[in-house]
Structures are given as structure tokens and as C-alpha cells.
Image (tube, helix red, strand yellow):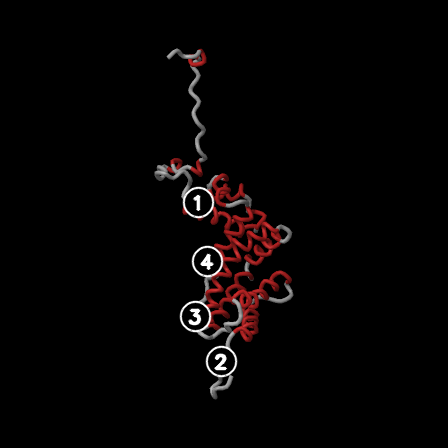
């Protein structure tokens, strides 16, 4: 075939642009898995969440930008946006993962012990720097319905699900009132902690948490019969 004049210019061929280093398995000396064109989420997600968690602990929500998370994690911004719509979603997921790790659901053998311990654990978590971060997240979602939905879906839903299991277990044991929906029980137990955190009118230290749990459980649990068989 007769070549066009431009083919004889001697210019080097134009090569396609290399992929982003953080998003390429080859950049780490690995071959990508056959048939998979995107980074493995089991590698990307922990790296991003660890970076966001570190930033939250260092300076709270203002430090968690996509640029900062990308720089800290080594994951490219396009990949981060593939899994999270914005920086707030990254921060919420990181905060949720931290709380799930530090506040596991209690299972001590009976409803009063379980729920009292869970209130104590939540109070201790929010008494740390995590309380400041939660306040920042709530502030960021206060006037933004879409952001508020992210907070409910990405953070609160998981916490509610765990505590709902605890409540249903208590009902199954016959120790909690079956006529009270889990959502009501959860609100009664944990809302005072968040209220004290945001208003600051009273502490959320261990003795206060125990008093809150005791007061709430007085109306949530089934009354134990006394020694003479009366309630």
C-alpha cells in the first residue's frame, strides 16, 4: 500500500496514555486478573477508608477531601469516585467502619446486661474525638437532604440493624416488651447520648450512661417477678 506523505516524516508513533499508577495492577508489578478491567474493591476500599479514618482523626471532616484521601491512600481520584459519590460519603463510610470496629454489639447473656453495656459502649465512643466527628457530620447534613440521606443509609442503617438484632433477641428471650418496635427502643436508649453530645448540658461518662440505660430499660423490659411471685 502506498504510504501518505505524513508517514515518512520520521516522527515517533503516538502511544496511548498510560493508566493512572494507583489504578493499574501492572504499576505494582502485577498482571490484572483476566476479564476484570477495574481495581479489586477488596484492595481499594480498605486503603481509602484507612486514609479517610486517619484524616478524620487528625483534623475531622474538613481534612477529608478526595484529593487528600487519594494522596494518603495511593488510590487515584477516578477510582475513589467510582465507589463514592463525594467526600462526605467517604467520611461517613470511614466513620461507620471505625464505630463498627470499636463498638461491637454486646452479647452478655441477658437483655439488661446487653443493652446497658451497649449504651455504655456508644457513650464511651462518642465521648472521644468520635463525638466531634459525629457533630461535624450532622452539621454537614443538616441543610442538605441528599447528604442527610447518605448519613442515614451509609451509617445509621448499619447501627440500627445491629441493635435491632439485640432487641429482637431480648424479645425472643421474653425479657423485653414485644409490643415496642425496635426503632422505638433504639431511639429511647441512644437518643439521650446524642442529645447530650450536641447540647453539652450533661456528661456522657460511664456513670451517666448507666443511669440513662437504667431509666430507659425500666420501660422497655418485662418486669421480673419478685421472690414471692409478684411483679
Query: Taking 193 as reference, is 134 above or below it?
Result: above
Q: Please identify the quarter of the rendering in which residue 203 is found.
A: bottom right
How far apart are the alpha carbons under marks 1 and 4? 19 Å
The residue indicated by pointer 1 is: 44
Q: What element carries label 2?
A: loop
Instruction: Check disc 4 and report the residue beneath it.
Output: 101
Residue 32 relative to residue 216: left or right = left
User: Distance from label 4 to label 2 (Cα)?
Assistant: 33 Å
Residue picked out by circle 2: 224
Disc 1 to disc 4: CB gap under 8 Å:
no
Other residues around mark 1 within 10 Å, as few (<14) / some (14–19) / many (≥20): some
The circle on residue 108 is 3
Label 4 vs 2, first from the N-terminus: 4
Residue 51: x percent and y percent?
Answer: 49, 47
Label 4: few (<14), some (14–19) or many (≥20) C-alpha neighbours in 10 Å: few
Q: How far apart are marks 2 and 1 (CA)?
A: 50 Å
Q: Which residue lies furthest to the front in this view?
A: 179
Q: What element carries label 1?
A: helix
Q: What is the CA distance from the residue labelled 1 to the residue labelled 3?
A: 35 Å
- The mark closer to the camera, 2 or 1, is 2
x and y percent of residue 32 in the render?
Answer: 37, 38
- 3 vs 2, front mark: 2
Q: Which badge, 3 or 2, comes first in the chain's sequence?
A: 3
Residue 55's disc number: none
Amino acid at each position: 500500500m502506498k504510504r501518505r506523505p505524513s508517514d515518512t516524516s520520521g516522527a515517533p508513533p503516538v502511544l496511548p496514555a498510560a493508566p493512572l499508577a494507583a489504578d493499574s495492577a501492572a504499576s505494582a508489578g502485577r498482571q490484572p486478573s483476566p476479564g476484570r478491567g477495574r481495581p479489586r474493591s477488596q484492595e481499594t476500599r480498605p486503603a481509602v477508608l484507612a486514609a479517610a479514618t486517619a484524616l478524620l482523626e487528625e483534623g475531622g471532616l474538613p481534612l477529608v477531601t478526595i484529593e487528600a484521601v487519594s494522596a494518603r491512600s495511593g488510590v487515584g481520584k477516578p477510582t475513589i469516585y467510582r465507589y463514592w459519590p463525594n467526600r462526605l460519603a467517604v467520611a461517613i463510610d470511614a466513620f461507620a467502619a471505625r464505630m463498627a470496629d470499636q463498638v461491637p454489639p454486646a452479647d452478655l447473656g441477658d437483655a439488661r446486661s446487653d443493652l446497658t453495656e451497649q449504651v455504655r459502649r456508644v457513650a464511651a465512643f462518642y465521648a472521644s474525638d468520635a463525638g466531634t466527628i459525629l457533630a461535624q457530620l450532622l452539621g454537614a447534613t443538616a441543610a442538605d437532604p441528599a447528604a442527610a440521606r447518605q448519613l442515614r443509609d451509609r451509617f445509621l442503617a448499619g447501627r440500627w440493624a445491629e441493635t435491632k438484632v439485640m432487641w429482637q433477641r431480648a424479645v425472643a428471650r421474653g425479657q423485653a416488651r414485644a409490643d415496642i418496635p425496635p426503632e422505638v427502643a433504639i431511639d429511647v436508649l441512644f437518643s439521650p447520648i446524642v442529645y447530650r453530645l450536641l447540647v453539652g448540658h450533661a456528661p456522657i461518662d460511664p456513670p451517666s450512661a448507666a443511669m440513662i440505660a437504667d431509666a430507659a430499660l425500666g420501660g422497655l423490659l418485662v418486669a421480673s417477678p419478685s421472690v414471692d411471685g409478684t411483679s
